[in-house]
Image (cartoon, rainbow, N blue to C red):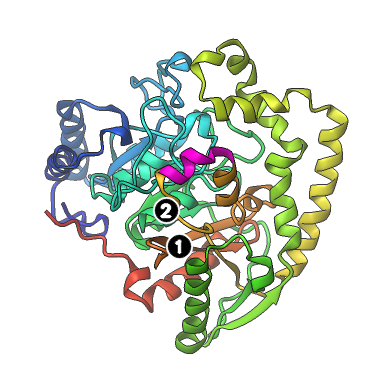
Amino acid sequence: MTELTASAVATPTARVHAAYRRLALEERPEAWIHVRDEREALAEAGLVERRLDRGEPMPLAGATVAVKDNIDVAGLPTTAACPAFAYLPDRDAVAVARLRAAGAIVLGKTNLDQFATGLAGTRSPYGAVRDARDPARVAGGSSSGSAVAVALGIADIGLVTDTAGSGRVPAAFQGIVGIKPTPGLVPATGVVPASRSFDCVGVLARDLVAARRAMSVLSDARPLARRASPTAKVFPRLAVASPEQLTALSPGTAAALARLERQLVDELGAQLMTVDLQPFLDAGDLLYGGALVAERYAAVGRFIAANRAAVDPSVAEIVLAAQSISIAEQRRDHRRLRQLRATATEAIAGCDALLLPTAPFQPTMSEVARDPLGVVRRLGTYTTHCNVLGMCAITLPAGEADGGRFGITLYAPASEDEPVARLAARIASRDPVLRVDSRVRP
């Protein structure tokens, strides 16, 4: 299989053939809920080739896509990893339609934490999704299947949702790139809601160039000009947290982060500005620990209450606990969120991005099994703030820590998607690990 950036080297038909060969070679059936018949995908590849012959602009011609199964693909069931919830959509989600219009070809629907509620990738009746490299570790969630499909070289693009870290955490654990855009940049029409006010559609890819190309298509290449963005500095200025506010990190992750920060100073001349992380942490707590979790119940709560036996116990506990939250409590927390947003924005003013470890550590399957709620809550410590604060984010792989994968995420205010992408490219270009080898070995 060829790289997405070298799509002209192989025809769409050849790329689809290669994807299905790779799918047959890998032993990760739990990553998929529904795989399209290869003949259907090949027929679509033929249509793409005919469109290319007519001279149509197709920036993603032949790129293969793994779609998270809470995003509609016409003619394929949408389950949200709950068979009792399944329905058959008659049209593509807007995001899927945009990728297909650009020449991308859907391979199938991928597994996820049920109703996109979780960060480990283990809460699914279709099976807990294992890490692509080490089956004893979790893949990360909730976009677990799409992340593994990309990491294994089956799909060029993973189409995902990310409300609390569901795209960023699996990107970090699978050693790939994740882009979580400014909320609202990519329409969520045709997506099963998790928290409607904060849901985002994002992408995963094996390198930043491929991820940015896919995101350009998803955002319909709209300019991000709601407010002026700072010009990237010759020496980037990065907001970072003090070690005292990173106590959730495992020792290995803390050491890996410290090494990376030193490298950015030495090799890029980065200026590191220590900021108070507390407003970010407090905002993140509101998503699940405060009244904002009521949106989870509004999305699927009635279904879960009526179909308790069909729902993962941890998912049911989280969603149904929000049933009793009052309107007054929701208004109170939205007021609090507005205050925190102002404080957080001020904290990183003048910086090109806030740099944080994506997750505190990559747990094993057994660690999650022993404490499914506690471990997953810890995984979201440094991700849950993003959407409630209206921020955009890019996750890059950054090596290993404590035997698992380690990733970093760059966060920026709303509408600064392009400046933070340029910064991510500068950071990735300085390190072979961060560049990400997107070649697929046979």
Q: Which mark is residue 407?
A: 1
In the rendered structure, the answer to whether residue 57 lies left or right of residue 197 reads left
**Helix, strand or loop for disc 2:** helix
Highlighted magenta segment, given as a residue range: 366-373
Residue at the image position 34 percent from the left and 22 percent from the top: 76
Frontmost residue, 382 versus 1: 382
Q: What is the secondary structure assignment of the residue under circle 1?
A: strand
Does residue 415 appear to the left or right of 368 in the view shown? right
- Give the image location of residue 177, x and y in percent: 40, 58
Q: Residue at x 63, y 64 (%)?
A: 247
**Secondary structure character of the magenta stretch overall:** helix
Q: Quadrant of residue 415?
A: bottom right
Vertical placement of residue 374 versus 223, above or below: above
Query: Looking at the image, is mark 1 or mark 2 earlier in the sequence?
Result: 2
Q: Are marks 1 and 2 in contact (CB under 8 Å)?
A: yes
Residue found at x 33% / y 19%: 75
Residue type at tag 1: Gly
Outermost residue to the top: 306
Q: Residues within 10 Å of mark 2 (few under 14, many from 20)?
A: many
Q: Is residue 344 left or right of residue 204?
A: right
Identify the mark at residue 227; answer none if there is no mark: none
Q: Is residue 330 magenta?
A: no
Image coordinates for residue 436, horizontal then vertical, percent: 32, 65
Estimate the x, y position of residue 440 in percent, counting from the top left: 19, 56
Give the labeled residue for mark 2. Answer: 171
Residue in the foreground of this view, choosing between 317 and 47: 317
Disc 2 residue type (three-letter): Ala
